[in-house]
Image: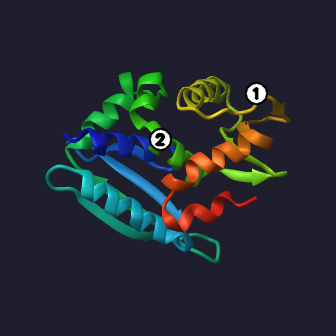
Amino acid sequence: MSAPFVALALSYCLGRGRIRLLGSRKRPWLEITRRETDLTYLLHQSRQLHKLHDGPLDLVIDTVQTDGFYDDRRLRCHGEGLYRVYELLYPRDTYTISDDLLDIAGHRGIVSLWCDKGRIRNNRYEIPFGTRARNYADTRMVRRWLRRLGYAPDQFNQIGRDRCIRFSGCNADDFARKLRPQLPRHRVASLRR
């Protein structure tokens, strides 16, 4: 098992990725689905996973039909390293974000969160976490993790029912400056306000 592979797969699971046990042998499969217009980033993710995995990695990219104009592209992969990722992400078979998991994901986790969930609204960078009660605890944990890694998110506020982490003013400039060198080349434009 490769520790960099586990960290990368965990970081992808913080974004759009998810791990499910499939088949009669209950093998863990990582699945990431994106619009076909975002195929470049999906291919980048598949190359990174393949490069860091020790041993064979079953990897499939296929097309999922949608009702919209664009279809989705889905990456599915299975390898021995995903057993450890599943154990960390699903202790007692329940999805749980923990401090240990976030520390393992490290800066790659921030990159994945921004690429998959980040948005710019009213000249602020935002990473939304949804409206469920569990998301409030996850948001506070992610906020503490960001502070440990040297980022300074704004104080928590809730607009309507949307809970998210925000960076504004000097904090937004600092966030963009630190994150820009870590982003894939085709994603750097996502930080322009």
User: Front-most of 39 and 110?
Assistant: 110
Residue at figure coordinates x 66%, y 57% from the top left: 191
> Can residue 168 be seen by looking at this rendering?
no
Residue at figure coordinates x 23%, y 58% from the top left: 58
* x and y, in percent, of residue 131 in the image: 71, 34
Q: In terms of image quadrants, where is residue 165?
A: top right
User: Front-most of 134 and 8?
Assistant: 8
Amino acid type of disc 1?
A: Phe
Horizontal side, residue 108 vs residue 147: left or right: left
Distance from disc 2 to disc 1, alpha carbons, whole Å, reads 21 Å
Upstream in the sequence, badge 2 or badge 1? 2
User: Disc number at residue 22?
Assistant: none
The residue indicated by pointer 2 is: 107
> Can residue 187 be seen by looking at this rendering?
yes
User: Front-most of 106 and 10?
Assistant: 106
Tag nearer the camera, 2 or 1: 2
* x and y, in percent, of residue 2 in the image: 22, 42
Which colour assignment does the render follow?
rainbow
* x and y, in percent, of residue 181 in the image: 51, 54
Pointer 2: residues within 10 angstroms few (<14), some, or many (20+)? some
Query: Vertical placement of 72 versus 76: above or below?
Result: below
Secondary-structure class at tag 1? loop
* Quarter of the picture holding the N terminus: top left
Horizontal side, residue 71 vs residue 169: left or right: left
Residue at figure coordinates x 14%, y 52% from the top left: 55
The residue indicated by pointer 1 is: 156
Amino acid type of disc 2?
A: His
Secondary-structure class at tag 2? helix
Pointer 1: residues within 10 angstroms few (<14), some, or many (20+)? few
Query: Vertical placement of 100 versus 51: above or below?
Result: above
* Quarter of the picture holding the C terminus: bottom right
Residue at figure coordinates x 69%, y 33% from the top left: 153
